[in-house]
Image (cartoon, helix red, strand yellow):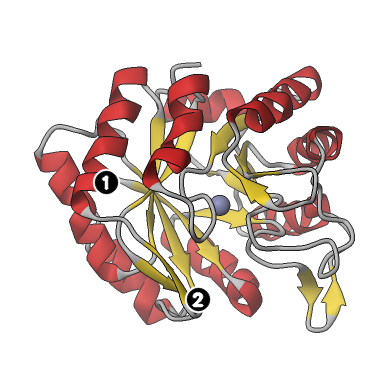
Amino acid sequence: MNNKIVITCACTGAETSKELQPALPITPEEVARTAEECRAAGAAILHLHVRDEAGKATQSVARFREAIEAIRRKSDIIIEITTGGAVGDTAEERLRPVIELEPEMASLDCGTVNFGDEYIVNTLPIMRTFAAEFKKRKVRATLECFDLGHVYASQYLIKEGLLEEPYHYGFVLNVPGAVPYSVENLNAFIRALPQGANFTVMGIGRSSLPAQYGAIATGGWIRVGFEDNVYYSKGVLATSNAQLVERAARIAHEAGLTPATPDEVRQYLKLRG
Ligand code: ZN
């Protein structure tokens, strides 16, 4: 994957609302249209959360199935479903869509983290359970690290044979109550990676754009989308997820990089396909 960069779009998330971002995709049809647009703009991976009728985050297998089927009718984008879920979900609820639907990729949170005044619990036993179920089904994990300790915690899973190469990390920086984005903090995470690992940088809120430049400078991959940030620039809402993907692709191009296609990523990350 010389001179390629992988762009993920996290189009919906668990916490963003239509009130905050009117273009937030919620229904399966909206999500599928977003997937198609983001794929055309250069995204290879769609990070997927789903919502119930009231627009509230849910880990309902039926909702995930509907969304995945709608996306598949329109796009070959890789679907990465969340197992982070929303604040308050149990570990069983978070894992169920992976067990039932066996996506190509899914997120795997590598430690407990503050989420503003709330928190999401990921003990090592929970992480082991998740990793074992992923492995059984050949679901590639994005090892989400919100804290430097999480990068180290993930390596217990490697030592215990619960993860297979190539390892793919997601550094989630600037979550309120966790680690702010800075070049120094990003570098500390990178230095702690196991040999040969790939990583995607996710800058939450106003750090989204600096984190994209940080990813490009360090050989990382990019994630954008309304889960992480709803603005295009200070005080100006983005008009769509695709608008954010377009900019990510544009700045990558300026750095001599081309967005990888889903099939290139399937091959590189050895996805089950
Ligand atoms: Zn997510």
Q: Earlier in the sequence, mark 2 or mark 1?
A: 1
**Label 2, ligand 1: CB separation under 8 Å:** no
Up/down of 256 relative to 44, above or below = below
**Residue at the image position 39 percent from the left and 39 percent from the top:** 92
Secondary element at tag 1: helix
Q: Which amino acid does label 1 sit on?
A: Ile
Residue furthest to the left in view is 159
Can you identify the residue that label 1 sits on? 126
Q: How far from the left and from the top, in percent, is residue 116?
A: 51, 78
Q: Name the residue under label 2.
A: 174
Establish if 220 lies above or below 36: below
Could you say whether the residue bearing mark 2 is in a helix, strand or loop?
A: loop
Residue 198 sits above or below residue 177 on the image: above
Question: Residue 195, can we see it?
Answer: no
Q: Residue 43: x percent and y percent?
A: 68, 41
Task: From the top left corner, tell me how far across and down residue 227 is, in percent.
Answer: 65, 59
Q: Residue at x 79, y 18 (%)?
A: 73
Disc on res. 227: none
Q: Residue at x 36, y 21 (%)?
A: 138
Amino acid type of the residue that numbered disc 2 sits on in the rendered structure: Asn
Give the side of residue 34 with respect to residue 206, left or right. Answer: right
Residue 108, position in %: x, y?
38, 45
| Label 2, residues with CA under 10 Å away: few <14, some 14-19, many ≥20 | many
Q: Residues within 10 Å of mark 1 (few under 14, many from 20)?
A: some
- The residues bearing labels 2 and 1 have C-alpha atoms spaced at a distance of 24 Å
**In-image side of 256 versus 214 (left or right):** right
